[in-house]
Amino acid sequence: MLDQAALDSLFTKARSHNDFDPTPVPEETLHALYDLMKMGPTSANCCPARLVFVTSQAGKKRLMPFIIESNIAKVEAAPVVAIIANDTKFYDRIPELFPHNPEARNWFTGSEAFAAETAMRNGSMQAAYLMLAARALDLDVGPMSGFDVAGVNQEFFPDGQFAANLLCNIGHGRAEAVFERLPRLAFDDACKII
């Protein structure tokens, strides 16, 4: 079991950040981040998440027109903005990723709706793994859904195979800009044991 300090850094004391100091996140850290994230489980090991780490001013200039006004300062301050997308044809990698049953690819090719649902569910799980991996590497995160999805898709994924799911700012957060922790539902309000 993880000790309390580890649980604090991942969950109980970790916070979503709205402002970041300008310290860059090295490319090798982004590789380490992905290498942790990719180990999280997905159904049939489908791994649909695809990431674009926006770290340059040129990249941010491309992204900014699609960010809602209340998120612009957050994106400007973050050393890294991860565009977390789903590969709509993730199933083409099933023979490689699920080698004991390469025919599992066929589970998804017969229904576009089932494939899209699977990609969204599992890609969202991978986004959560990304945030926990970042926290494990002593980075802070600020997930965002306030952006023009169609615009981001057109700008960054014009061939249509990848579809943006959410954005996540990554870096070293400024503690003074963190809001008070918001309430969470109690066990009995959110859970049932049967």
Image (cartoon, helix red, strand yellow):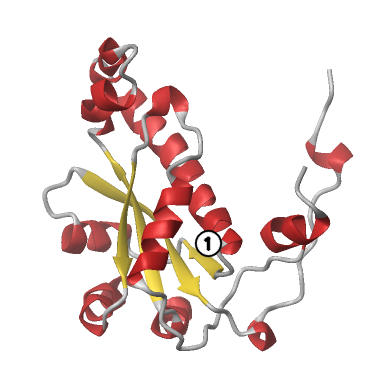
Q: Nearer the viewer, residue 90 or 37?
A: 37
Kind of residue at disc 1: Ala
Q: Is residue 82 left or right of residue 2?
A: left
Residue 47: image location, x then y, percent: 37, 36
Q: Is residue 164 left or right of residue 7?
A: left
- Which corner quadrant of the image does residue 166 belong to? bottom left
Which part of the image, by quadrant, shows the N terminus? top right
- Which corner quadrant of the image does residue 75 belong to? bottom left
Name the residue at 24% across, 29% down: 93
Residue 64: image location, x then y, percent: 30, 78
Above or below residue 112? Residue 2 is below
Above or below residue 71? Residue 177 is below
Q: Secondary structure at mark 1?
A: helix
- Which corner quadrant of the image does residue 106 belong to? top left
Work out whether residue 68 can be spotted: no
Residue 157: image location, x then y, percent: 18, 55
Q: Residues within 10 Å of mark 1 (few under 14, many from 20)?
A: many
Residue 180: image location, x then y, percent: 76, 75
Which part of the image, by quadrant, shows the C terminus? top right
Q: Name the residue carrying label 1.
A: 134
